[in-house]
Image: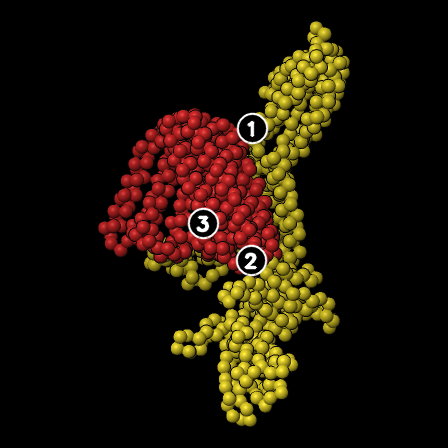
Chain colours: A yellow, B red
């Protein structure tokens, strides 16, 4: 990652030059990093887009009650209550982008030259000036050793060109010259990601849709009542929560959705958290759930009634309805419902949550107008399904009382963002884990023997390359001993 | 034998190793050094076994398959994994640089973390997962984040050491920086420790922090205790500032050079930064996109990981500016790890956000 700072060349600089120098400096980049970080800290302490009272409370805890209201006004004026969308934060990101672009424009031509520059054969004096330089003497003339040396170089996976010289040969080559571009690839990827984010903001939307079971909608919503037309209809066929054992901790929640386009059902899919549905660029994410306010009026019970003889019938009564148990003259009246029933030690029933955590229905059974028995039947407790006279009422579902909370998003920029992420990964990988290495191997005849001189350089991780060169030397000397 | 047996064994091994490493520095006997390394390696093997066992226990219990049952789903499991990465990173450095002195700096971090788990009563139970955590991204995102955190922790240790040994005068910025940092750390640990032993509160960490923190010192009902706490804190800061150079002489015995420390700091960050970018930020964004339909929502956890990313970007770019090598960038490395700690613990314990489930 070591770059070079550029020296001031001219003494008299115009104003434009000065601005250009400022925008192309690493120092500006560092100042921007610090500014984005420090302002973001404030943004994580103040709750973004929250009610004034909430943030006044937070400020009161930190600075004291008396200062809080005035401080809130100040932060509000400075745009800190929705800071990531404020003009100055956008300005910082813009300055960041300009800094990246100008830095690259300033440095890239020089780096490109380094990448493209071919390696040329060098003289012995020059080879000896490299920090990594080694020498070994092999028996026999260069002609005899040439193949062995070239083999070892190839074995080290270094592709070299060869040239015949006055008193021998020279192999020279380079590897990873393109790795010098890793830094620029990384910088460029930030621009791609920001571009993707802008595309998403301009051409996409982010909304929500609370869709009751059985309901159809052709739009999602954003904020209080802003409608976002979908261009098709979406229907929630069913919604269900699965819990861990008998606990109230949801294991999974699922919605069965149907997409209807021009009156035709075109797609059916069940979605869950981490498993969304996409249609025509719009994606539906399972995000929450809850009870429909007037659920009692629209809900339909699904009971599977099993008679004494074992024959099963599915019944769909509504709240307050009376139904008959097959093969008997017993009727049941749905008298009460609780989405989350709990019974305390005194036997009082109450509702403990505003969710369908433990749905229960109170049924009064009677025979020819006379009350026989009554009790709670719980969906999650099959032991309550049994009727004293034999047979049972299986509580399968209370359909239509729950809504599924969907996050609805259209973001044509997300693929650009992902492309930027891939570019960034590649850029970082090359920038940190690859290096530009050059190597020269010279074979010189000396008293019927061959002197091998190696000179090498690497822009990063010199120690590792040095070890590699040492290995080449040791392999060469071993071959020598073996050939005796 | 189950996972908790091996976890206990590794905790004991690391604490023992910490004491032996410190003895090694004092006496400089090769055999003591070898013993310290051996015990660390034994602890590491035992911890590896424990993690694998817990993974299997979780997979059997949840029935979600091996890939989704990585034991990285709550504070306890992630802290354990952090310690595991840290020790692995340390062993690599010990092997590569043939220097054991860092052990005395790294094993205490491992010991402190494990002690934090036991003292604060972080739940060790295997807990069922909330639906959002059931994803194949869990393993990639969390494991890579913690590998990066461990690399950053190493750079923090070496960065701090290099600040300590390069300090010459008591009025220079880098000296004041490290003494104050160390002083605040000591004060925070001491006050938290007193709070803990006074209230003996075995509650969830976030409840502890909201209801009990500093109630025995700075937030004590009596004004006298308040004032005394402040005076003592200032005294601690002053004492560390006054006698900090003693620590320099101790570390100078380690035969470490500022260049070597600078190199390890840089290399740890050079490994941590790309892994953090890919595993922490990018995989995190993809997962958020899958689960919530927003790849970036500026929630406190995301924002703090971005802040951490910028601090390390600051470090990497700062090194390329002439005159910024050495002390200045070492300070940035130290600040970087503080941002890491805040991203990981501070956000969950102090701020709220979508990620709040991580602290259960």
Q: Which circle, 1 or 2, is nearer the viewer?
A: 2
Which label number is shown at residue B345?
Answer: 3
Residue A192 visible in the snapshot: no
Mark 1 Cα shell of 10 Å, populated few (<14), some (14-19), many (≥20): few
- In the rendered image, the vertical position of residue A313 relative to residue A30, given as above or below: below
Residue at screen point 66% across, 18% down: A478
From where the camera sits, is residue B239 visible? Answer: yes
Dividing the picture into quadrants, the one containing residue A204 is: bottom right
Q: Position of residue A345 (x, y in %)?
A: 40, 75
Circle nearer the N terminus (3, 2): 2
Label 3 sits on a secondary structure element that is helix
Q: Identify the residue position indicated by label 1 in the image.
A: A7
Q: Nearer the viewer, residue A250 or B337?
A: A250
Above or below, B78 relative to B100: below
At horizontal 50% and vertical 77% (from top left) the residue drawn is A338
Q: Are marks 3 and 2 in contact (CB under 8 Å)?
A: no
- In the picture of the structure, the residue carrying the numbered disc 2 is B62
Label 3 Cα crowd, 10 Å radius (few <14 / some 14-19 / many 20+): some
Q: Secondary structure at mark 1?
A: loop
Q: Is residue A468 above or below residue B224?
A: above
Residue B325, position as x, y percentages in the image = 48, 30
Number of residue marks: 3
Judge from the rendering whether residue A92 lies leftward or rightward of residue B112; answer left or right.
right
x, y percentage for residue A440? 68, 20
Residue B141 disc label: none
Residue B271 vs residue B74, the one in the foreground: B74
Q: Residues within 10 Å of mark 2 (few under 14, many from 20)?
A: some
Q: Chain of mark 2?
A: B
Q: Chain of mark 1?
A: A
Of all residues, the one furthest to the top in this rendering is A447
């Amino acid at each position: 990652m070591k770059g070079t700072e550029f020296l001031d060349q001219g003494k008299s600089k115009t104003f434009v030059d000065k601005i250009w120098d400022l925008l192309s400096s690493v120092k500006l980049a560092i100042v921007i990093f610090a500014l984005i970080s420090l302002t973001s800290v404030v943004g994580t302490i103040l709750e973004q887009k929250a009610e004034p009272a909430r943030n006044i409370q937070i400020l009161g805890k930190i600075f004291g009650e008396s200062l809080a209201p005035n401080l809130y006004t100040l932060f509000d004026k400075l745009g800190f209550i929705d800071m990531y969308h404020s003009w100055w934060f956008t300005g910082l990101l813009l300055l960041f982008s300009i800094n990246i672009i100008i830095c690259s424009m300033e440095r890239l031509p020089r780096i490109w030259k380094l990448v493209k520059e071919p390696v040329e054969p060098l003289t012995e004096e020059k080879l000896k000036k490299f920090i990594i330089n080694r020498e070994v003497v092999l028996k026999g003339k260069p002609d005899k050793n040439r193949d062995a040396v070239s083999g070892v170089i190839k074995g080290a996976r270094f592709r070299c060109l060869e040239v015949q010289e006055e008193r021998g040969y020279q192999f020279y080559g380079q590897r990873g010259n393109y790795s010098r571009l890793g830094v620029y690839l990384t910088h460029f990827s930030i621009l791609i990601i920001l571009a993707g984010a802008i595309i998403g903001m301009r051409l996409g939307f982010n909304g929500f849709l609370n869709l009751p079971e059985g309901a159809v909608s052709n739009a999602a919503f954003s904020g209080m009542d802003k409608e976002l037309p979908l261009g098709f209809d979406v229907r929630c066929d069913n919604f269900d929560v699965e819990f861990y054992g008998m606990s109230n901790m949801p294991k999974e929640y699922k919605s069965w959705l149907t997409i209807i386009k021009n009156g035709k059902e075109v797609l059916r899919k069940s979605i869950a958290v981490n498993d969304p549905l996409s249609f025509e660029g719009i994606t539906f994410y399972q995000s929450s759930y809850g009870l429909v306010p007037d659920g009692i009026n629209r809900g339909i019970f699904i009971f599977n009634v099993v008679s004494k003889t074992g024959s099963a019938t599915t019944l769909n009564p509504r709240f307050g309805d009376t139904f008959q148990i097959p093969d008997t003259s017993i009727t049941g009246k749905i008298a009460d419902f609780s989405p989350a029933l709990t019974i305390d030690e005194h036997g009082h029933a109450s509702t403990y949550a505003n969710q369908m955590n433990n749905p229960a229905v109170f049924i009064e059974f009677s025979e020819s107008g006379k009350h026989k028995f009554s009790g709670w039947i719980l969906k999650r407790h099959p032991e309550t399904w049994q009727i004293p006279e034999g047979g049972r009422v299986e509580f399968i579902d209370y359909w239509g009382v729950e809504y599924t909370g969907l996050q609805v998003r259209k973001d044509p920029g997300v693929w650009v963002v992902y492309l930027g992420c891939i570019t960034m990964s590649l850029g970082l990988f090359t920038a940190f884990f690859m290096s530009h290495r050059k190597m020269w191997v010279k074979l010189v005849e000396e008293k019927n023997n061959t002197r091998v001189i190696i000179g090498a350089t690497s822009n990063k991780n010199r120690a590792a390359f040095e070890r590699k060169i040492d290995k080449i030397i040791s392999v060469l000397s071993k071959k020598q001993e073996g050939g005796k | 034998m189950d996972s908790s047996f091996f976890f206990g064994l590794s905790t004991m091994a690391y604490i023992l190793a910490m004491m032996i490493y410190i003895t090694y520095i004092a006496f400089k006997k090769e055999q003591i050094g070898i013993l310290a390394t051996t015990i660390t390696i034994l602890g590491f093997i035992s911890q590896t076994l424990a993690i694998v066992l817990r993974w299997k226990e979780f997979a059997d219990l949840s029935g979600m398959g091996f890939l989704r049952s990585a034991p990285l789903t709550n504070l306890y499991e992630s802290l354990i994994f952090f310690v595991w990465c840290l020790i692995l990173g340390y062993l690599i450095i010990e092997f590569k640089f043939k220097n054991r002195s860092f052990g005395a700096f790294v094993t205490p971090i491992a010991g402190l973390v494990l002690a934090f788990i036991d003292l604060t009563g972080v739940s060790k139970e295997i807990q069922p997962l909330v639906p959002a955590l059931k994803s194949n991204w869990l393993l990639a995102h969390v494991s890579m984040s913690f590998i990066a955190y461990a690399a950053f922790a190493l750079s923090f240790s070496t960065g701090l050491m290099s600040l300590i040994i390069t300090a010459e005068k008591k009025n220079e910025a880098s000296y004041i920086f490290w003494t104050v940092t160390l002083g605040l750390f000591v004060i925070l640990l001491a006050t938290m420790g007193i709070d803990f032993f006074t209230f003996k509160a075995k509650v969830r960490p976030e409840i502890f922090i909201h209801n009990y923190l500093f109630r025995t010192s700075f937030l004590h009902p009596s004004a006298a205790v308040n004032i005394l706490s402040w005076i003592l804190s200032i005294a601690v800061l002053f004492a560390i500032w006054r006698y900090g150079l003693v620590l320099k002489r101790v570390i100078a015995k380690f035969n470490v050079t500022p260049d070597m420390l600078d190199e390890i700091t840089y290399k740890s960050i050079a490994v941590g930064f790309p892994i953090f970018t890919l595993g922490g930020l990018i995989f995190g964004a993809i997962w958020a996109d899958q689960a919530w339909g927003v790849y970036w929502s500026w929630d406190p956890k995301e924002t703090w990981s971005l802040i951490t990313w910028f601090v390390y970007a600051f470090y990497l770019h700062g090194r390329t500016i002439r005159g910024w090598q050495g002390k200045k960038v070492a300070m940035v490395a130290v600040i970087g790890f503080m941002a890491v700690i805040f991203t990981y613990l501070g956000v969950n314990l102090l701020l709220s956000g979508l990620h709040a489930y991580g602290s259960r």
